[in-house]
Amino acid sequence: MKNFVTGIFVVFTMMMASSVQAIPTLFFDGSINYTVDSGELQVSAALTETTDINPAPELSGSSMNFSVFFDTVETYSASCFFCATSTRGSFHGATDALINDLEIFDGNGNTLLTAKFLGLSLEGINGGTTGEVIGLLNATGGSLEYLFGSSDLFALQLGLDTVFSNTMYDSNFTGMVDGNIKGNSVPEPSPLALLCLGLLMVILVRKLTV
Amino acid sequence: MHIFQRFAAVVVLLIPCIANAAVVRPALDIQLFSGDAGAWLTETSSGAFDFDIDATAFAIVFDDITANIDIPNQSFTLHGTYDAGANAFYGSFNVAGGLLSGSFNDLTVAVLSSGSIDFSANLSYDAGSLSTGLTGGRLEGIGNISNLSAKLGPVSVVPVPAAVWLFGSGLIALVGLARRKA
């Protein structure tokens, strides 16, 4: 009976330990610029932090640049208590498969990540100057490609020199952008390793004391 | 002449309004880290709502993005209660580590079609090392329970990096050990 309970406890603890996930993330901060003639939305930023990436890349002097092209604009409205009328612009990456839409370099000039955008949208409350940037990426190269195979981009767009409306893409605008790119979640190995080490110690101590 | 004076007065009055309309840098960069709960709205009873944020402040950012300052990660929490009469939330916020705390009474939230919540408020700073010489600032952000990005500014003091504190405490320990040996 005692062994049965101990067995269940061990299996449960191992399951708990192995469920800890690490999500490699790159945080960035920079500026956004839309040009009506080309329909191009460009972001120039620097990395401000990374998590769950070892070794951590050099952030000082790092750069992140991407560009996408305007597709459509739509207005949304809903009837919930705090719902507001918003405008969402949809963008696509370069049609040439060989041209990367996104490039990230560390402070030493090494390529951390190159990627193609599967899609990107920009949405904000009508009349406001803040909005949300959501993108889906497919990594194509760089030293972190294995961590960011299929990844998500999320950013706050603020301080726009225009306001969100269905005519905002009829003229140029600029603003600031601040967000992150989250990679594929991978199991965190250290809790499991620590648990195994602890179990080995317990077994060793019991054998020595018997 | 009167027209010119009136125009000048209107411009002078508008300047603080414009400055109030956006986060002024340097600002705290706040985002969702692993283990943070994000931003969410709760209907506590019919027509009564709470708004909460649980995220992490991790850097001070400047207009010149190359001058950003990395700070030790600190928990950022905010709790607001909806005032139906004012159609706004009032409440308080805190950046752990004694960095900054304060209150607000005009927080507005709006839900996007994606489900993310757009939020902004003018803040009163009560305490904290980042509030020195400042009476208040502004918070702007967007987020949900799985992602969040926000800016809080302006902040005024460059905090001493954790490494300096560790180095300093190590030095003090060494001096203490040397004295005990002597």
Image (tube, rainbow, N blue to C red):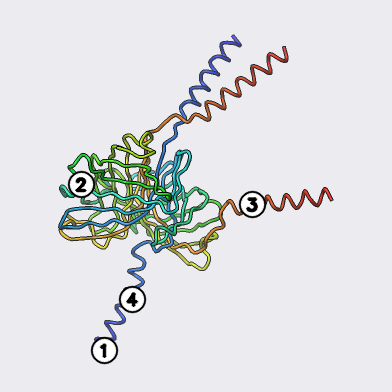
Residue with the mark numbered 4: B13
The residue type indicated by label 2 comes to: Phe
Q: Name the foreground residue: B165 vs B140.
A: B165
Residue with the mark numbered 3: B167
Name the front one of labels 3 and 4.
Answer: 3
Label 1 SS: helix
Name the front one of labels 3 and 2.
Answer: 3
The answer to whether the residue labelled 3 contacts the one labelled 2, judged by CB atoms less than 8 Å apart, is no
On the question of residue A149 being in view, the answer is yes
The residue type indicated by label 4 comes to: Leu
Q: Quadrant of residue B154?
A: bottom left
Label 3 SS: helix
Q: Residue at x 42, y 51 (%)?
A: B80
Q: Residue at x 59, y 11 (%)?
A: A3
**Mark drawn on residue A186:** none
Chain identity of mark 1: B
Residue with the mark numbered 1: B2
Label 2 SS: strand
Is A92 displayed left or right of B102 in the figure? Answer: left
The residue type indicated by label 1 comes to: His
On the question of residue B50 being in view, the answer is no
Name the front one of labels 1 and 3.
Answer: 3
**10 Å crowding of disc 1: few (<14), some (14-19), many (20+):** few
The answer to whether the residue labelled 3 contacts the one labelled 4, judged by CB atoms less than 8 Å apart, is no
Residue with the mark numbered 2: A91
Question: At which x and y percent is residue B81?
Answer: 41, 51
